[in-house]
Image (cartoon, rainbow, N blue to C red):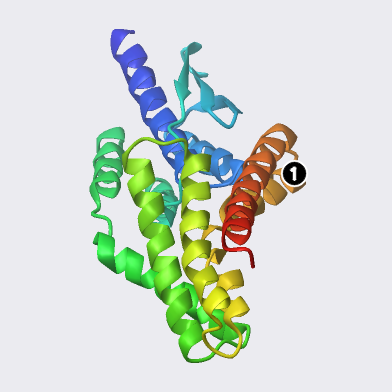
């Protein structure tokens, strides 16, 4: 009996860990539910799962012994880490196909969490290059591309530094949008290039909340209305912070 309870408790802790990792890494509610259910079924347990934007409540049931364990775990602040999302998805199929046990699953989770991030300046350079590419996509040339690159780089740097200093995430986005639009707005003020307004408009596109808005739409379609609304509002607040940063830069530079 003690061994059965211990195994159920370990399973529950592992499943909660999987669910919260997926939620905090940018997975949709439906994906979290599907993945956790897949692992639980492979281990021979039934579960009841309640997913909110900031927490998961899980009940693991062993029908053979009629034992169950229920717990609640808070989700860490949401970000985007598709390496973790795809890694956990692949792992869940390995559990089904190769009959992994809890120890193997926990080892794989630890490995995924410990995977190193890209070096900071590689991330900054890649994001800045993406901003410059957006400018080129809208017809920017020459100096506009350089301005978009520099402004996006500075905006991303400001956002990272703001988060390091524990500013509110929305305030950090405002700071980033303001910094990027101030630098790109100077090119409009000075008349650099043929269409400097293209660099001004595209320098903040790296802040667009694509993942929250896509997840919001997906959750609403799947019937997870509450999570969909929360994620949609989160995306709208981010969009407001971006717009506010642009507006402040526009008024400051009088452009």
Q: Considering only vertical position in the picture, is 204 above or below 190?
A: above
Closer to us: 113 or 121? 121
Q: Is residue 163 left or right of residue 232?
A: left
Image location (x, y in percent) of residue 196: 57, 81
Question: Disc count in the image?
Answer: 1
Q: Residue at x 62, y 50 (%)?
A: 244
Image location (x, y in percent) of residue 68: 48, 13
Q: Residue at x 33, y 23 (%)?
A: 10
Closer to us: 13 or 255? 255
Q: Is residue 41 left or right of residue 122?
A: right
Image location (x, y in percent) of residue 210: 60, 57
Crowd class of label 1 (few under 14; some 14 to 19; many from 20; radius 10 Å): some
**Residue most toward the top?**
1
Q: Is residue 225 left or right of residue 95?
A: right
Q: What is the secondary structure assignment of the residue under circle 1? A: helix
Which quarter of the figure is the C terminus placed in?
Answer: bottom right
Q: Residue at x 44, y 51 (%)?
A: 85
Does the image show residue 85?
yes
Closer to us: 152 or 52? 152
Image location (x, y in percent) of residue 82: 43, 56
Q: Indicate the quadrant where residue 124 lies.
A: bottom left
Does the image show residue 134?
no
Q: Considering only vertical position in the picture, is 83 above or below 64?
A: below
Q: Residue at x 57, y 53 (%)?
A: 245
Which quarter of the figure is the N terminus placed in?
Answer: top left
Q: Is residue 220 left or right of residue 105?
A: right
Mark 1 lies on residue = 220
């Amino acid at each position: 009996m003690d061994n059965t309870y211990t195994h159920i408790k370990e399973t529950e802790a592992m499943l909660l860990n999987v669910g919260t990792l997926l939620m905090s890494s940018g997975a949709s509610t439906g994906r979290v539910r599907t993945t956790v259910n897949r692992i639980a079924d492979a281990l021979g347990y039934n579960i009841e799962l309640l997913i909110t934007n900031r927490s998961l409540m899980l009940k693991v049931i062993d029908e053979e012994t009629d034992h169950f364990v229920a717990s609640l775990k808070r989700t860490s602040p949401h970000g985007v880490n598709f390496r973790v999302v795809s890694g956990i998805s692949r792992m869940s199929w390995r559990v089904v196909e190769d009959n992994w046990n809890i120890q193997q699953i926990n080892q794989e989770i630890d490995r995924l969490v410990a995977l190193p991030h890209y070096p900071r300046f590689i991330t900054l350079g890649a994001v800045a290059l993406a901003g410059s590419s957006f400018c080129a996509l809208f017809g920017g040339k020459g100096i506009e591309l350089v301005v978009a690159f520099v402004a996006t780089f500075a905006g991303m740097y400001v956002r990272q530094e703001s988060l390091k200093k524990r500013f509110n995430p929305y305030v950090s986005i405002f700071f980033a949008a303001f910094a990027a639009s101030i630098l790109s707005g100077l090119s409009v003020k000075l008349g650099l290039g043929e269409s400097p307004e293209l660099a001004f408009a595209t320098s903040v596109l790296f802040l667009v909340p694509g993942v929250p808005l896509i997840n919001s739409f997906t959750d609403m379609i799947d019937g997870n209305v509450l999570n969909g609304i929360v994620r949609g509002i989160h995306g709208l607040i981010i969009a407001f912070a971006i717009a506010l940063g642009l507006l402040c830069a526009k008024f400051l530079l009088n452009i």
